[in-house]
Image (cartoon, coloured by chain):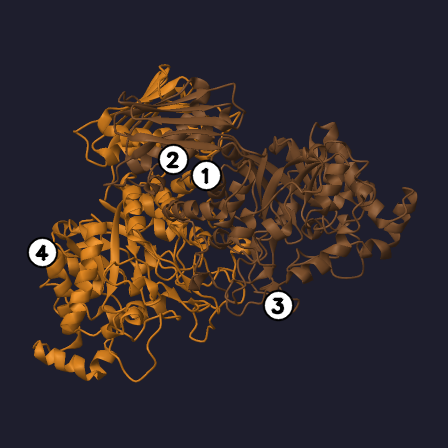
Chain colours: A brown, B orange
Amino acid sequence: MLLPRPTSLTIGEGVFELTRTARIAAPGELFGAAAWLQGALRPATGFPLESGSDGVIALEWNPQLPAEGYTLDVEPGGVRIAGGGPAGVFYGCQSLLQLFPPEIYRRGRVVGVPWTLPVVSIQDAPRFGWRGVMLDVARHFMPKHDLLRFIDLMAMHRLNTLHLHLTDDQGWRVEIARYPRLTEVGSWRRESQLGAASYSRGDSRPHGGFYTQDDLREIVGYAMDRAINVVPEIESPGHTQAAIAAYPELGLGGDDEPLGVWTRWGIDDNVINLEESTVEFFTNVLDEVMEIFPSPFIGVGGDECPKNRWRLDERTQRRKEELGLETEEELQAWFIRRLDDHLYRHGRRLFGWEEILEGGLGSSVSEGATVASWRGTAGAIAAARAGHDVVSCPDDRVYLDYRQSDRADEPIPVGTVLTISDVYRFEPVPPELTPEEAGHVLGGQGNIWTEHMDSPRTVDYFAFPRLCALAEALWLEGERDYDEFTGRLDQHLARLDALGVEYRRSSGPLPWQQRPGVTGRPLTPQQRAAYFEPLTARIDR
Amino acid sequence: MLLPRPTSLTIGEGVFELTRTARIAAPGELFGAAAWLQGALRPATGFPLESGSDGVIALEWNPQLPAEGYTLDVEPGGVRIAGGGPAGVFYGCQSLLQLFPPEIYRRGRVVGVPWTLPVVSIQDAPRFGWRGVMLDVARHFMPKHDLLRFIDLMAMHRLNTLHLHLTDDQGWRVEIARYPRLTEVGSWRRESQLGAASYSRGDSRPHGGFYTQDDLREIVGYAMDRAINVVPEIESPGHTQAAIAAYPELGLGGDDEPLGVWTRWGIDDNVINLEESTVEFFTNVLDEVMEIFPSPFIGVGGDECPKNRWRLDERTQRRKEELGLETEEELQAWFIRRLDDHLYRHGRRLFGWEEILEGGLGSSVSEGATVASWRGTAGAIAAARAGHDVVSCPDDRVYLDYRQSDRADEPIPVGTVLTISDVYRFEPVPPELTPEEAGHVLGGQGNIWTEHMDSPRTVDYFAFPRLCALAEALWLEGERDYDEFTGRLDQHLARLDALGVEYRRSSGPLPWQQRPGVTGRPLTPQQRAAYFEPLTARIDR
């Protein structure tokens, strides 16, 4: 019935029928949730839900519940939702919506559907406090209104963290007042690589877009109204070519043409230099980012920074000596620590990919620094043991750009096969951890890298329904039963249909969801392991 | 200030400030507009607007006003909107929104903006009853949620008619229960022509999508809540290749491979046959369409049907004799008349392109049949003189796929140059008409053909801000002053910015709005006239 499945649900006798004379009642502090619920129920029902007296949907606080916990009681005479905090009340409202027929999700009047709810009693609270999605809006820009829709879809699944990957080699998507060229130059590229092979050609089509600071404030506020925290991410020291294209002084220079925004996919050799002026540039950027995003966590990236250019660059070698460092890994760690110092002084927590555990950094960044562990579980284990909080997002469980089956018609297939069932079995806490270490695992997130998703329609295809499975994996305490889940998922797909979500059908991609002739880069589990093992070996343990 | 400009607006002294303790008050019948206004004002302000008493926004009926007319009075102590009908009240609410700072259009809390309105008195009513947009969702499908957004943008501009071009050679976008292959087969094509030249290559990428009947009911209801009527269009007898691909028995047959959904742009020789079974097929389709769309007008197309295949086809020639007809134009007229009979019997009015005036049809279709006049004004003049209602949409004034300037960097430039100023000067009533004949001109519409708009982002670029100019041309009675308009347009663009509309900048296309290397087909006015003149000469006068 509900998805994610609630902690407990008891069905009673009878039904509650929502009618024109019903009303939503809430104390002033819960106006936000009440307004959301009105807005959600009105379009399909056509009911005002404002001043009737016939059936009351009452929203209330219950300070004895956890902040994200709620109870939902449907009786023939009325509905009561109590939450431990605004998020809990909001989730109670989301669950209420799922008790109605799926037509409730339509945004125009639906006639002939009885708006009845079964009598139920629900107690519910999530297992993890970080139930997230990383969305890469750098590789392909997602227009603001599409992003707001994506936030709605997250909220429907009681996900609470949107990790917004705002910058990368292929695009810089956040307006920075002090450095206007970041968006003037960095927000678009001449073309995009079509496919995932080294020989894949370009598509000859410019791509671009960016969010103004006002746009981002709006996104943050919209998400906050839906109990979602937006964690911004500004990548460095790798994945920075778009910034270098805008401000060449950030780069290593050289004899070549000035760098443009990158038009290829993959790991880019063009990384920033580590001069003091570059540190200052990034801390200045982070200052504006902190102005926009109230998130306690601020992402700095830190992943996949190739060190070979640093090794060959004289200025960087001098810098290394000057700083008394011995390896390029230490140099990277030094840079990340500078960002960490800056964020810490501003009361924020650094959020970075597991590579920030290399070069002795794990033991020297501030205690609050938090690690996104992505190449299997090695990073999660190392970070938790070093006393750092962890967000688990192992590629082979929750990288939603990985192919959804081994069919040949999957569009631009990359990575290993990652089915709904694989995602559903995702366990954020590695079994190697002691209970105390496990306490450092804040939760998990699915990562949506968009190299091969050039429109919101394609994001729909890759994200759903796997994101439904992920949401339940992060929400539900205790055993999960995949067979039982699939029954609820079938019902849930009717909700996604009503919302116009172009999810992947269990029968495979629809003809227009396919990309015939565009080469992917599928991996076997063995190939994947062979690639990652030497890399994760670099993590300090 | 407002766009479209209202009939009269008087600014007084002082301001009204919307606060947390304000309230929207409306009688039950106006709940729809009140709910819309709450939903529009709440996100940015964060105000409940439900039960306060400090400043009331009162919505009321005023039966002395025309149905779409309204008055809007802002006093320091409160706001009063009176409308002649639901549409009038709704337009009063839309105009109220425009009196606020543009940040009101943000969907997340905006802090630091005073929500003040100038004291004003506005009387307003539209000149025309048909203020429309034709959107071609056949050449490129627009996902439902994007279409709902487009409806919101229309409503903001007080446009009231969405002519939805649902079927064409390149795609069939409406689910028909009786003929499931129309969407199974007809809703997608193997690839799309990239550019407008005869030698333009295909893009090798499948394209598709369709609306379920529930989706369309939702779209209709959503539009209705915003005072917009949706006029569906099912093309015939030309522009039918997607239908023939699904049901080859509709076509003329021949020795070739079975037809697929067309992957080229232009005028297609593959038209339907005119057997009784084909008439029945289309009337059956129209029966389902009438079930979904309450619109008094039902579009049947009728444009650009090449007759050469009919001339060469033995069966069609026999059919012509059997029916006692002499020309292929008469044959087409006969087919359209059959559809007209059917619609008439169901209490609907046929809506067709001006080609339905060929072959003696103008004098034989039912009186209510209405003509969309598109190749200049010849069709409008002929139709009005024949006593038929007319919707003016001359290509050289309101075809929003035509290039916006003569710059070389306009994306896939087609047609003649059509600037904002050209659209602004659009006059739906040809000067040749007598006042009585002019009474047949219901209004006008802008046509958005999407051959070269493969995403909602591109539709934004072509539609805006020209659609703003069109909305005013159709709304405003009396003289229009382009210079004065441009001042208001500048203010209005801040509203579009807040909404994330990717309109064309006056400085030209942004880099990522360009399509370098993709060939268009620009025309000079002379080339255009030379193409159309022999065609419009066929219209019966």
Is residue B481 something one can see in this rendering?
no
Q: Which mark is residue B186?
A: none
- Element marked by disc 2: helix
The image position of residue B435, as x and y in percent, is 14, 49
Question: Between B495 and A105, which is closer to the camera in this rendering?
Answer: A105
Mark 3 Cα-neighbour bin, 10 Å: few <14, some 14–19, many ≥20: some
Tags 2 and 4 in contact by the CB under 8 Å rule?
Answer: no
Mark 2 Cα-neighbour bin, 10 Å: few <14, some 14–19, many ≥20: some
Tags 4 and 1 in contact by the CB under 8 Å rule?
Answer: no
Q: Is residue B512 above or below residue A175?
A: below
Which is in the foreground here, disc 4 or disc 1? 1
Q: Is residue B73 above or below residue B1?
A: above
Separation of disc 2 and disc 1 at Cα? Answer: 9 Å
Q: Is residue A520 above or below residue B313?
A: above
Mark 1 Cα-neighbour bin, 10 Å: few <14, some 14–19, many ≥20: many
Residues at marks 2 and 1 on the same chain: yes
- Element marked by disc 4: helix
Q: Which mark is residue A97?
A: 2
Residue beneath disc 3: A200
Q: Amino acid at mark 3?
A: Ser
Q: Amino acid at mark 1?
A: Met
Which is in the foreground here, disc 2 or disc 3? 2
Q: Is residue B208 left or right of residue B70?
A: right
Tags 2 and 1 in contact by the CB under 8 Å rule?
Answer: yes
**Quadrant in which the C terminus of chain B appears:** bottom left
* First reached walking from the N terminus: tag 3 or tag 1: 1
Residue beneath disc 1: A156
- Element marked by disc 1: helix
The image position of residue A528, as x and y in percent, is 68, 59
Question: Between B459 and B10, which is closer to the camera in this rendering?
Answer: B459
* First reached walking from the N terminus: tag 2 or tag 3: 2
